[in-house]
Image (tube, rainbow, N blue to C red):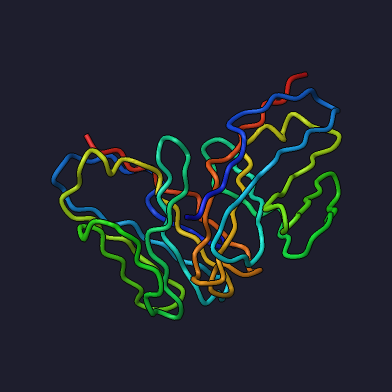
């Protein structure tokens, strides 16, 4: 079957670094997405990885290991506005669907 | 200059009623979607249209009927609403057919409450 796992909730301190992990099992693989969703709002696109390695975009970086079925989102210099849910999603090359994780709720404390 | 807009933002209605949610995108994207996000925050694909053609039709009760009059619009009509239909419904669009490197752009969601 197809499955995505990520922790339900994480807590971190303002100014610190946090790593949110995502493991996946899909029948094929066509890239992995990370989205941010603030409470009561729509998900917004953060990053896309299709090759192994680290992609850096300002304070946010995303890593992928296809052989391990594993990705993480790294957030540096945490700000209070980073409090949100972070959703991991991946697609199978056998169809056009994205499979979504349940999201990791990140709580930032002062 | 809203990219993906859906209306209404809130919808409160009684069981058994019929309601519609409208969605429009001005990004020139070829593919549009309806997603349901339940109280546990799982995003579940319901339907996807590519250039007005239905390409994904998940196991959704046939009380839900999407309509795409053109590639910029995808509406969702729901008949005989049930309590379990209460959720947030998101419209989204992407340049290509989803599970490739074209990210989804979401509307702000319609919070449906069935009483």
Position of A75 with respect to B47 (left or right) is: right
Above/below status of B50 relative to B40: below
The quarter of the rendered structure image containing the N terminus of chain B is bottom right
- In the image, residue A78 lies at what x, y percent? 81, 32
> How many marks do you count on the picture?
0
Question: x%, y% of residue A68?
Answer: 71, 52
Query: Residue A87: percent from the left, percent from the top?
Result: 60, 45
Work out whether residue B108 or residue B47 is closer to the camera in this orientation and state it: B47
Q: Quadrant of the C terminus of chain B?
A: top left
Residue at point 23%, 41% (across, down)? B13
Identify the residue at horizontal 84%, vertical 54% (top origin).
Answer: A54
* Residue B12 position (above or below residue B59): above
Q: Quadrant of residue A53?
A: bottom right
Q: Is residue A53 shown above or below A6?
A: below
Q: Quadrant of residue A13?
A: top right
Residue at 40% from the left image edge and 44% from the top image edge: B88
């Amino acid at each position: 079957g197809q499955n995505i796992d990520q922790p339900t909730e994480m807590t971190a301190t303002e100014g610190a670094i946090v790593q949110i992990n995502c493991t996946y099992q899909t029948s094929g693989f066509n890239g992995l997405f990370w989205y941010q969703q603030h409470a009561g709002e729509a998900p917004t696109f953060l990053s896309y990885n299709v090759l192994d390695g680290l992609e850096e975009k300002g304070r946010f970086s995303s890593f992928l290991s296809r052989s391990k079925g594993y990705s993480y989102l790294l957030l540096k210099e945490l700000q209070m506005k980073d409090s949100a849910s972070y959703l991991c999603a991946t697609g199978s090359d056998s169809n056009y669907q994205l499979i979504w994780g349940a999201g990791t709720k990140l709580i930032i404390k002062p | 200059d809203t990219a993906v807009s859906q209306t209404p933002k809130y919808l409160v209605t009684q069981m058994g009623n019929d309601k519609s949610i409208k969605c429009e995108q001005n990004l020139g994207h070829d593919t549009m979607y309806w997603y349901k996000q339940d109280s546990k925050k799982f995003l579940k694909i319901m339907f996807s249209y590519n250039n007005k053609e239905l390409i994904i039709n998940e196991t959704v009760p046939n009380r839900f009927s999407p309509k795409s009059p053109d590639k910029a619009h995808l509406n969702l009509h729901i008949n005989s609403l049930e309590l379990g239909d209460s959720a947030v419904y998101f419209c989204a669009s992407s340049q290509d057919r989803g599970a490739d490197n074209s990210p989804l752009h979401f509307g702000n969601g319609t919070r449906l409450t069935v009483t």
